[in-house]
Image (spheres, rainbow, N blue to C red):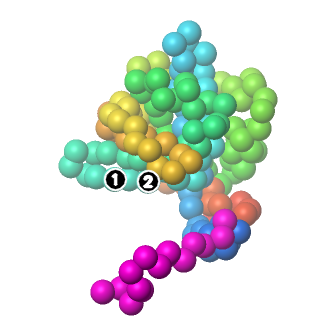
Amino acid sequence: MNGRSEGQASPCVSADSFRGAMACLASGVTVISTRDAQGAPHGVTVSSFVSLSLDPPLVQWSLRRTAPSYAVFSKARHFAANILAADQEEVSRRFCAPVDRFAALRAATGMADIPLLPGALAWIECERVDEFPGGDHAIFLGRVMRARHHDRPPLVHWRGGYHNIA
């Protein structure tokens, strides 16, 4: 028994309270990149990227379903997670803004022709396995095809701002 009477509605947390509590969780900053059907590069900054499984190697991340790039990622067969280094705050901000996000970037080309951001702390190249509903977001599941990394400090987002933990 949960202590509630039959028919009693469960308490609902306010969006502000939930947002404030979640801001206490420090997270790495990742730009997810892909190409659309015409071959144009697309990318978006996310803080929801996490590993899911080692065997098989799987990752998951989420994107608001009203995001301008949602349709591109929902149709993409492959994506890359570009985990940002401590000196890449400008890159994170660029991939949140309504600008040509790849302008003046010399992106490398990964497996399946996916753009990889220069200077990233790590690149995790994936085949998209599935998409699941998650409230106002879509949850993407990817099978890792290749992963590479450098030994440098990460860019961290905590309490609404960027931090260097080095």
> Is the residue 112 above or below the residue 15 in the image?
above
The amino acid on which the numbered mark 2 sits, given as a three-letter code, is Val
Residue 67 image-quadrant placement: top right
Which residue is at 71% across, 29% downward?
101
Which region of the structure is painted magenta? Answer: 1-15
SS for tag 2?
strand
Q: Hey, which residue is sitting farthest bottom in the picture?
A: 3
Residue 31 is at least partly visible in this image: no
Determine contact: label 2, label 1, CB under 8 Å.
Answer: yes
Label 2 packing within 10 angstroms: few (<14), some (14-19), many (20+): some
- Tell me the residue at 66%/31% (across/down): 68
Q: Is residue 140 above or below residue 9?
A: above
Location of residue 117 (image quadrant):
top right
Rendered location of residue 109, percent (x, y): 51, 22
> Residue 52's mark?
1
Q: Position of residue 24 (x, y in %)?
A: 62, 73
Return the mark for residue 50.
2
Locate the N terminus and report the quarter of the image it occupies. bottom left
Outermost left residue: 55
- Depicted 23 relative to depicted 128: above or below: below
Extreme residue in the front direction: 7
Disc 1 marks which amino acid? Leu
